[in-house]
Amino acid sequence: MTEQTFRPRARFVIGPDGSPLTVADLPPKNTKRWVIRRKAEVVAAVRGGLLSLEEACERYKLTVEEFLSWQKSIDHHGLAGLRATRVQDYRGA
């Protein structure tokens, strides 16, 4: 029998605007229009342990690559990097 490390799920994380973010505050599962705020909330939820990467991808029908691109955009360019109209500007940077 292998021992698994159990990491309790966070009850809330700090969202991109600095306020507490719970699972109930996350974008709806059927979200089709991904504005900056919604993308940033999902990234914050995964980083803070509110959702696992797998749960987020399944819940929102995302590929791992798509999620990781959001995370990388935030890390390199801040929230403005998530703006769909700016992707080409930031891609080469």
Image (spheres, helix red, strand yellow):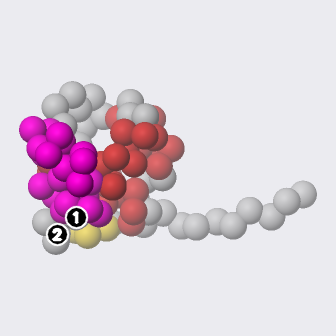
Residue 28 relative to residue 60: left or right: left
The residue lying at 34 percent from left, 46 percent from top is: 69
Residue 23 in percent (x, y) is at: 32, 53
The residue lying at 19 percent from left, 50 percent from top is: 90
- Secondary element at tag 1: loop
The residue lying at 16 percent from left, 69 percent from top is: 19
Residue extending furthest toward the right: 1
Q: Nearer the viewer, residue 47 or 24?
A: 47
The residue where tag 1 is placed is 15
Q: Is residue 1 above or below residue 66?
A: below
Say whether marks 1 and 2 touch (CB < 8 Å): yes
The residue lying at 38 percent from left, 30 percent from top is: 61
Residue 38 relative to residue 48: left or right: left
Residue 14 in percent (x, y) is at: 26, 69
Q: Amino acid at mark 2?
A: Ser
Q: Amino acid at mark 1?
A: Gly
Residue 54 in percent (x, y) is at: 50, 44
The residue where tag 2 is placed is 19
Q: Is residue 71 above or below residue 67?
A: below
Residue range (magenta): 73-93
